[in-house]
Amino acid sequence: MPVLCAVCSTNNAALKRPKTGQVICKECFYAAFEDEVHRTIVTHQLFSPGETIAIGASGGKDSTVLAHIMKTLNDRHSYGLNLILLSIDEGITGYRDDSLETVKRNQVQYDLPLKVLSYKELYGWTMDAIVQQIGMKNNCTFCGVFRRQALDRGAMGLKVDKIVTGHNADDIAETVLMNILRGDIARLRRCTAITTGTEGAIPRSKPFKYTYEKEIVMYAYFKKLDYFSTECVYSPNAYRGHARAYLKDLESIRPSAIIDIIHSGDSLSVKSDVKMPIQGTCSRCGYISSQELCKACILLEGLNRGLPKLGIGKVSGSTLSSHIRKMELKETDDQSSESCSCAGEEGNKEGNKDGCCSGERTVSSVTVGDSKHLLDF
């Protein structure tokens, strides 16, 4: 015997909500899903009328549903927002090239402008080339750091006011667990924030902060949205996968575990005597960083020098910055030696007493990173 919807008591129930356990029909599910996201946007005042918003679009379920929801709610509730799709092409053959085709179809379906930026364009590397250098173990470190900065670079180029991403409740709860396991207090303190980046970069918001991943999948499925569902070929060994598996086990026992973990992260406070990183800017590219060089510049430096593991591991950012600076000084010193015309001249075997070297070489005014605008476009 069919079960009636617990909300309208008219239509037959089509699903059981993972988040609440309610047995409801599709129409009531659509309404509840959209209303909850709308309440999140309004309660946290994520946007203001007239703002230009870049939607991080990958073609996957989260970003596709986000684009659909933002378009729907913007029209329904008159947010007054200018929406743009922003996609990053990491250069992963057989994955990102296919998913970008989905994004291009979404552009037509939702009638939104689209901008695509590539790692190759911004950094001179593709993820395929990076994996050939680093292997399958730490590749997600490169991709995560580069992708985050690429989104900001793209948003700055488009002159948008804010970025919205499809990070859902599961993603945020996984991040809390990962930061606990790594003992990363700085990230643990801010990882549940619904809006980040207000201290310097373009603010980034997460309208799906309280939305379960399973419900996003159900919404996309029942709405027959066009999305790409293949997993990244380089992600099976990602550290996040272990946190995800643990969270799924918790959810199977206690469905509220996801939201409970997020609320725990929201309630976290750090003792005043705990030293926290001070936010500054990268001396090379100008991106926000708590070290002299940002993580992206350190990783890129390692790749370009044939030392792909330079920025991997627990070595501090200040130590890495110092190491890179010493390498640059040595290179400049070597170049100065090679270009000195007095060396090797007849009568100058022990140093030119009257010439340019005077037996010594002095290196002055060396800038850390000749390519100060290396990441600009």
Image (cartoon, helix red, strand yellow):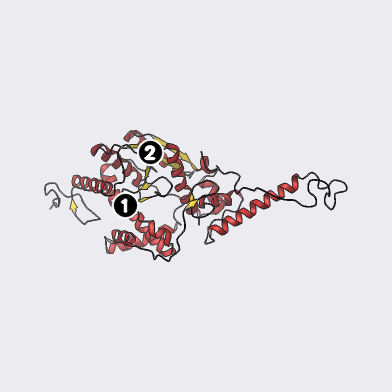
Specify the farthest residue to the right: 347
**Residue 115 at what x, y percent from top left?**
42, 36
Q: What residue type is labelled 1?
A: Lys
| Nearest the eye: 2 or 281 | 281
| Nearest the eye: 158 or 8 | 158
Report whether 57 appears left or right of 211: right
- Residue drawn at the location 41% of the way across and 61% of the way down: 179
Q: In which quarter of the image is residue 110?
A: top left
Specify the farthest residue to the front: 354
Residue 97 visible in this rendered orientation of the protein: no
Secondary structure of residue under mark 2:
strand
Q: How crowded is mark 2: few (under 14 residues within 10 Å), some or many (20 or more)?
A: many
Q: In which quarter of the image is residue 64?
A: top left
Q: Which residue lies under the disc numbered 1?
A: 209
Q: Residues within 10 Å of mark 1 (few under 14, many from 20)?
A: many
N-term mark: 2 or 1 = 2
Vertically, is 327 above or below 53? below
- Residue drawn at the location 54% of the way across and 44% of the way down: 125
Q: Which residue lies under the disc numbered 2?
A: 85
Report whether 138 appears left or right of 67: right
- Residue drawn at the location 38% of the way across and 56% of the way down: 191
Report whether 10 appears left or right of 318: left
Secondary structure of residue under mark 1:
loop
Q: Which amino acid does label 2 sit on?
A: Leu
**Residue 278 at what x, y percent from top left?**
47, 56
**Residue 318 at what x, y percent from top left?**
55, 58
